[in-house]
Every structure is written in structure tokens, then in C-alpha cells.
Amino acid sequence: MSILERYQNRVDEYRLNGNYLWKLGLLRKTENAKLLLDYGTLHAFVKTPHSVAYKCKFYTNSNNLQEELSDNYLASSSEMLCKNIFENFGFITAKYYPYKIGSKIHLASPNFLEGVCEYTTLHAFLCQKISPKQEESLLEGDENAISLKMMLRYFARNNLTFTLENKTDFLKFMTEECYDKYVSYMLLSLFAFCNDEHPNNIIFCRDDSSKKFQDVFIFDKESTAFNYFLAKKMKFCDIKYKMFHQEQEGSDIIVNYGAESYSDKLKGIKRLVLEGKIDKKYIDLINQYANLSLEGLRDKVYIEDGLYIKDEQLDCYKLGRDCAEELLQNC
């Protein structure tokens, strides 16, 4: 049974709904001051969703309440829509249960992954230290120790070009299936304009018996390159211009280099396609995204989670879908 199947079985066993979880869970803080809903046999992380751009502005400028609440709603609905997008492509995703406290939406996310597999964030993986014994093995030419050293070097950023050009090295510490999921994660995040893809926001999974990562767990998709602009009531044409002609705020997926607009990113993907560095299965993935029913997923979010994704927000997601279609037509 796959990690995804075991994960889904655990979710199904609990049969939680939002009200039940929020009413029976004990809200407390962890040692690092994060909010947690303690459900006894299950712990749920709690967050108040906001875009990266809003968080940056919040700490430097005063924000009006209307803007704050709008960004919170947009970030919450983005989380739920992206969860459904990634599930549509076969990913393991965090489950979220919305709850309104006062005028703001909070999301509780139970740790259903615990007990299902071994898992680590990219950040924790990068921060692991090589022991003196491993250093000694490295000097002696031990293949496993060398692979570990390579992991820490190659996994520094979510860089699409680098990942595609160094597949052989990546396969030394992840399976072919996991590698495909990792590349797919980067492509889907690009077309959904996700801009909070830092090393703490992606998790790699493996069974106890496996020496390599086997799957990718998706979570924390609340921030996009456009949500804060929508909260500020910017016009669609202005939002599009800022995204496609200015460097992006946040931790984007890199295609060419660090500082790039979405126009640069799309040109970079086109270049990779023309150079034959993007396999047909990933071109098929882009084609599937170009034909994705975002309207249907909006209905699903409204029915299951009670969050209505407004037309102006859906139009921004449709722009990413249009970019995927245009890219394929020009290649």
C-alpha cells in the first residue's frame, strides 16, 4: 500500500468535520509558540492565513482592517483551492478545517501524516549535520556519505532548471516517482502563482524501510503573487503587469535565476521545453493544467468548506491556466 493510500485511510478513520474538531480540541501553544489544537490522539496545527506580501507590509506599515480581513479571506480560499488542485494531480495534501473566530478565518490542519511514514521538511533535511564518522567515510570515498554531501548541496533551492539538469544526482536520494512529484510540484506551483515555496514549506516522505524519499507532501499554499494586490483592490490589468514585469516578493520557484518576473519564468520553461529538458510527461502535466476545471474546483471548495472564491480571484488563477495553454501552443 502506498504512502498516499495509508494517509487517506487515516483521514477516513477519523471522519472529522471542522466544527467537531474545533469544539472538542484543546487550543494551546507549542514550545515555539505555534498554536495547536490538541485532540488527544491527534494534534492539529492552527494558522491565520495571510499572503507573504501582506505579512511583510504588516510589519512595516499600518494596514486598515478591511485590507487585513480581505487578505485573510483570499489566503484562506487559496489554501483550499490549491489543496484541491494538487489532489487532482495525485498529491498527498494537508487537510484543512476552516473556522471563523471573530471576523477572521483560521485553519486547523491535523497531522494525519504522523505514524504513516517518515517525513522531513526540506529545511530540516538541509540543516542535518554530517557526523565525524560520515566525514571520515567521505574522505575514504564511501558512496553513501558522498551522496549525503551532495544532497545538502543540490537541495539548496527549489530550482526547476537545476533539478532537470541534474536528475541522476537527485535519484541518488529520491525514487523516480518522488522526483516526478518534485518536478510536478514546481511546475504546478508556478502556474498557480504560489509565492511561499521556501524550504520549510515542502515535505518529503519515505517508508521506514526505504533509504530514498518516495513521495511529496503539499501544504501551506495560502500565498500567491496576486492575493495581496486583490486585497488592496487593484485592477486586474495592474496586477497582471506587476506579476509579469516586476521581480516577485516571496520565495518563488526559480526557473532561471533568483530575481525574475513571471514573464522570465515562463520564458525559462519555454526554453527548457525547446531544449528537450522537459520530458513529455511534464508537458502532458502542463496540458492537463491548461484544461483544469477551476470553476468546478471553486464549487467543490464552496460545498465542502463554505468558502466562496470570488470571480476576481478565480480570474487570476485562470491567467495561470491560460499561460500553460499559451506556452504549449508556442512550443
Image (spheres, rainbow, N blue to C red):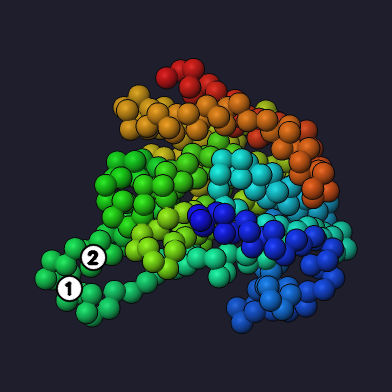
From the image, which quarter does the C terminus lie in?
Answer: top left
The residue that label 2 is drawn on is 144
| Image quarter of residue 48 | bottom right
Task: Identify the residue at horizontal 59%, vertical 44% (top origin).
Answer: 86
Task: Kindly report the distance in space between the C-alpha atoms of the residues bearing marks 2 and 1.
Answer: 9 Å
The residue that label 1 is drawn on is 137
- Residue at the extreme front of the image, as rendered: 1
CA neighbours of label 2 inside 10 A, class few (<14), some (14 to 19), many (20+): some
Task: Identify the residue at horizontal 60%, vertical 36% (top origin).
Answer: 242
Q: Of residues 102 and 40, which is closer to you in this image?
A: 40
Three-letter amino acid code at disc 1? Ser
Say above or below: 145 vs 66. Answer: below
Three-letter amino acid code at disc 2? Asn
Q: Is residue 312 shown to the viewer in this render?
A: no
Q: Position of residue 244 (x, y in %)?
A: 55, 32
Task: Identify the residue at horizontal 46%, vertical 18% (top origin).
Answer: 330
| Residue 239: assigned label | none
Say above or below: 96 vs 256. Answer: below
Q: Is residue 38 left or right of residue 177?
A: right
Q: Is residue 125 shown to the viewer in this render?
A: yes
Q: Position of residue 40 (x, y in %)?
A: 72, 78
- Asked if the residue at tag 1 contacts the one at tag 2, i.e. Cβ–Cβ closer than 8 Å, the answer is yes
At mark 1, the secondary structure is: helix
| Image quarter of residue 280 | top left
**Nearer-N-terminus badge (2/1):** 1
Q: Of residues 224 and 247, which is closer to you in this image?
A: 224
At mark 2, the secondary structure is: helix
